[in-house]
Image (cartoon, grey):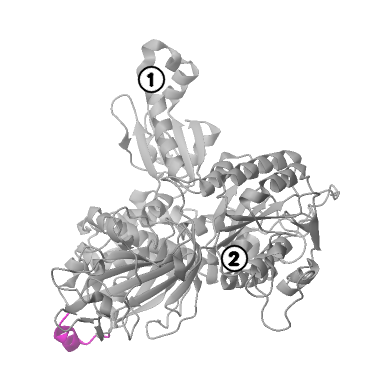
């Protein structure tokens, strides 16, 4: 794995196959598709930033890179993608073998260009808070305190607006600080259009509406004064905003005991999107929605007001008996198109014991590249710390950037099937697009309205080369080239262009299996399979994920394993492939595939995070890491198995969304007896503290902030650990583990799973 991590540290890319199968048939035999997981704006401390525009190929628009062939005497460079000859412009006059520009250095395969400041005036970031008021007083207090903390952390030049909603939507006029003033919208059946909003909120009192053209921002028809009524620099409106928040009351309309509160989330988000579209189109703007319950009124409602009607479950969705679902999804798809067109982001902070509708809103959050946080309450550390993390600056900041466009170029024998991740297709058709579509496909360019240092896209390729042995032999170069180009607005406000160019060797023919195995990255492959299976579960009806994963694993093992026919004991896998079955075993049991016991909102939340995180984090979601602490040895990795539990051990489980500190029975007894407070038991106090320190380090750098669970063996919270362990000792197994634990489950253990796999592979 180490060499794949080194490649990631250089370019932010992990590929499932680092040696590429050279023909269509061989790629099909490999089961796991040729794919790359790429982090477009990953932070590299040593990456050069060039203060001039990138030099592009005349024909295919790819950027000059270390793989270009350069003729120094004729001052010509040959593009490795389309083999077109390009002349160097005058500013490259002094180029020679001893005087190379940075973009031709062999080790600068990833490089960034910064546009001169005058080309684009810096636009301030815009934040529009959309706050739910249909929540109990206690939640309201928590939310107001978190928001006022966030407001103090905002950059002074950022523009801020506030919308509150419950039975009605209130757009607060912050520019009029003498008395609180707001415009009220009722939950209608339709979307609130931009023109209705401009009319209703008297934008044209002082300056008449232009007769032709689109009204959009100060440049096209709106006076800066009218925009400043609703969106003000943070430094100017801090007092007005604080006083509005202080006065903010819970929704005043009475709710009958047998009904849910009237909450028009869809109308509020529609008003927010139209307000930003009218005032600041194309700028780095975010709608931050804080929602404390399900939408029951207007477009985007997910359930009726009657409490006797339950909120849709996975079973209802499978049977197509969720009456509000299709209408709500259609509304949020429309909203996502509007946000992507305007270049704006929707962030969702959902804090409620019940579902709020993340399953329906997912499309708008994911396509606009927004952040999502799910917690039980606005007072929970998961929400409070995550919100603080969004605004903090320092080494662990998110590096929020915006207005991104992501393009791919590759050698002519490769096509792009699509991208799975937080982006929206730009419908750029061309010879690069495959007929098979995965995720956002049928294009070679995507829009990333919002992205951060950790945003990772999964790109699925198709090998288009037909099986023609002569062509394979004749081809002079056996290299495939890939180029990822990301144009985006850096969080400093500057426009940047990040270019990553990769070269991978392709092989075909009888001797290729060993080479393919040597270039197989098990972690990247597992994450790719997890993203594909999650995506299929959402769009294909009657799809059986377990069967699909099992067939894929059996096929892969029969292609790359060593065995004699009909002899399971002879089966063996190369170390390069040996952990992959384990990843698939845990993926089959994970929250991405097993929806039982999770609400549709939780499932949507887990999948959204999986689709945007890098390989290392995604692997922890699929197969959690377990560390053991005891008196006999320092912290050491433990097998994710029930056998790891012992009475005199502490276990630290990191499953990404939850961090569990689990005390064995004896440790828990000693702790309750207070031994760690006695001076002669210093070693015990240190043992208790070590997992605390390690969990703090994990929590500090992660977004969304994970939930911390501290529990004891045989306690009720121990289920958070037991659910993730391999059930090698269950209530019906023969051997009992002394001092350990057993799991009450009918799930098969990894040993049984492997046994079945071997038997099926050798048939």
Q: In the rendered view, would you say 430 is above or below 741?
A: below
Badge 2 crowding class, 10 Å Cα cut-off, few under 14, some 14 to 19, many 20 or more, is many
Tell whether position 470 is magenta.
yes
State the image coordinates of residue 702 (x, y, percent, origin top left). Answer: 45, 46
Could you say which quadrant of the image residue 664 lies in? top left
Q: Which residue is mark 1?
A: 684
Task: Count how many numbered circles sit on residues in the image.
Answer: 2
Mark nearest the camera among 2 and 1 is 2
State the image coordinates of residue 640 (x, y, percent, origin top left). Answer: 37, 43
Q: Nearer the viewer, residue 385 or 740?
A: 385
Q: Is residue 75 visible?
A: yes
Q: Quadrant of the C terminus?
A: bottom left
State the image coordinates of residue 746 (x, y, percent, origin top left). Answer: 47, 48
Q: Nearer the viewer, residue 579 or 432?
A: 432
Q: Secondary structure at mark 2?
A: helix
Q: Nearer the viewer, residue 680 or 332?
A: 332
Q: CA distance from mark 2 to mark 1?
A: 50 Å
Q: Quadrant of the N terminus?
A: bottom left
Badge 1 crowding class, 10 Å Cα cut-off, few under 14, some 14 to 19, many 20 or more, is some
Q: Nearer the viewer, residue 530 or 697?
A: 697
Relative to 472, 59 lies left or right: right
Q: Secondary structure at mark 1?
A: helix
The range drawn in magenta is: 466-477
Q: Which residue is mark 2?
A: 364
Tell whether position 679 is magenta.
no
Number of the label disc, if any, that sits on residue 132: none
State the image coordinates of residue 354 (x, y, percent, origin top left). Answer: 67, 49
Q: In the rendered view, would you say 583 is above or below 719?
A: below
Q: In the rendered view, would you say 489 is above or below 93?
A: above
Residues under numbered marks 2 and 1 in contact, where contact means CB atoms less than 8 Å apart: no
């Amino acid at each position: 794995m180490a060499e794949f991590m080194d490649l990631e540290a250089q370019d932010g890319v992990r590929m499932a196959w680092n040696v590429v199968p050279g023909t269509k048939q061989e790629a099909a035999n490999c089961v796991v598709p040729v794919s790359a997981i790429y982090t477009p704006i990953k932070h590299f401390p040593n990456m050069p930033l060039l203060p001039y525009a990138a030099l592009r190929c005349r024909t295919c628009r790819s950027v000059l890179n270390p793989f270009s062939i350069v003729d120094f005497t004729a001052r010509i460079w040959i593009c490795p993608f389309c083999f077109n000859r390009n002349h160097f412009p005058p500013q490259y006059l002094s180029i020679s073998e001893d005087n190379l520009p940075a973009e031709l250095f062999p080790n600068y395969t990833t490089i960034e260009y910064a546009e001169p400041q005058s080309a684009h005036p810096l636009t301030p970031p815009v934040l529009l808070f959309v706050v739910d008021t249909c929540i109990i007083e206690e939640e309201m207090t928590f939310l107001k305190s978190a928001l006022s903390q966030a407001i103090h952390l905002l950059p002074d030049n950022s523009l801020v607006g506030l919308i509150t909603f419950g039975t009605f939507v209130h757009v607060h006029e912050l520019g009029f600080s003498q008395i609180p003033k707001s415009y009220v919208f009722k939950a209608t059946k339709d979307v609130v259009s931009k023109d209705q909003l401009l009319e209703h909120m008297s934008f044209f009192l002082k300056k008449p509406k232009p007769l032709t053209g689109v009204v959009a921002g100060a440049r096209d028809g709106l006076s800066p004064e009218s925009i400043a009524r609703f969106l003000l620099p943070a430094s100017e409106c801090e007092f007005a905003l604080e006083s509005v928040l202080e006065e903010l009351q819970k929704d005043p309309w009475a709710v009958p005991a047998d009904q849910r509160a009237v909450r028009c989330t869809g109308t509020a988000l529609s008003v927010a999107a139209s307000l930003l579209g009218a005032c600041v189109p194309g700028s780095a703007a975010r709608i931050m929605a804080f929602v404390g319950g399900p939408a029951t009124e207007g477009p985007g409602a997910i359930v009726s007001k009657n409490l006797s009607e339950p909120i849709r479950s996975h079973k209802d969705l499978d049977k197509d008996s969720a009456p509000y679902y299709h209408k709500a999804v259609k509304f949020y798809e429309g909203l996502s198109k509007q946000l992507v067109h305007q270049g704006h982001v929707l962030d969702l902070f959902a804090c409620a014991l019940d579902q709020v509708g993340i399953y329906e809103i997912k499309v708008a959050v994911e396509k606009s590249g927004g952040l999502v946080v799910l917690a039980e309450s606005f007072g929970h550390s998961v929400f409070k710390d995550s919100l603080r993390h969004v605004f903090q600056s320092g080494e662990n900041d998110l590096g929020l950037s915006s207005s991104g466009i992501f393009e791919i170029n590759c050698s002519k024998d490769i096509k792009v099937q699509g991208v799975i991740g937080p982006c929206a297709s730009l419908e750029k058709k061309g010879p690069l697009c495959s007929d098979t579509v995965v995720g956002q496909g049928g294009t070679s360019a995507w829009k990333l309205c919002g992205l951060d240092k950790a945003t990772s896209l999964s790109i699925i390729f198709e090998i288009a080369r037909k099986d023609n042995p002569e062509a394979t032999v004749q081809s002079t170069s056996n290299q495939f080239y890939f180029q990822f180009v990301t144009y985006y607005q850096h969080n400093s406000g500057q426009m940047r262009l990040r270019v990553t160019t990769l070269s991978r060797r392709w092989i075909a023919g009888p001797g290729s299996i060993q080479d393919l195995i040597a270039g197989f990255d098990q972690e990247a492959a597992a994450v790719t399979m997890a993203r594909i299976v999650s995506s299929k579960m959402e769009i294909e009806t009657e799809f059986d994920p377990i069967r699909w994963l099992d067939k894929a694993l059996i096929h892969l093992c029969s292609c790359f394993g060593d065995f004699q026919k009909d002899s399971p004991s002879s089966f063996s896998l190369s170390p390069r492939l040996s952990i992959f079955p384990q990843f698939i075993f845990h993926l089959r049991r994970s929250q991405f595939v097993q929806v039982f016991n999770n609400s549709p909102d939780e499932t949507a939340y887990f999948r959204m995070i999986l689709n945007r995180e890098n390989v290392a984090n995604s692997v922890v979601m699929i197969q959690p890491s377990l560390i053991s602490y005891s008196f006999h040895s320092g912290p050491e990795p433990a097998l994710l198995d029930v056998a790891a539990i012992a009475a005199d051990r502490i276990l630290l489980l990191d499953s990404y969304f939850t961090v569990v500190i689990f005390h064995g029975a004896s440790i828990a007894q000693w702790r309750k007896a207070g031994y760690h407070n006695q001076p002669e038991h210093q070693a015990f106090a240190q043992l208790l503290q070590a997992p605390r320190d390690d969990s703090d380090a994990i929590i500090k750098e992660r977004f969304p902030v994970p939930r911390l669970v501290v529990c004891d063996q045989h306690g009720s919270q121990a289920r958070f650990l037991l659910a993730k362990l391999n059930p090698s000792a269950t209530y019906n197994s023969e051997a009992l583990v002394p001092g350990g634990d057993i799991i009450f489950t009918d799930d098969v253990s990894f040993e049984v799973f492997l046994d079945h796999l071997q038997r099926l592979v050798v048939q």
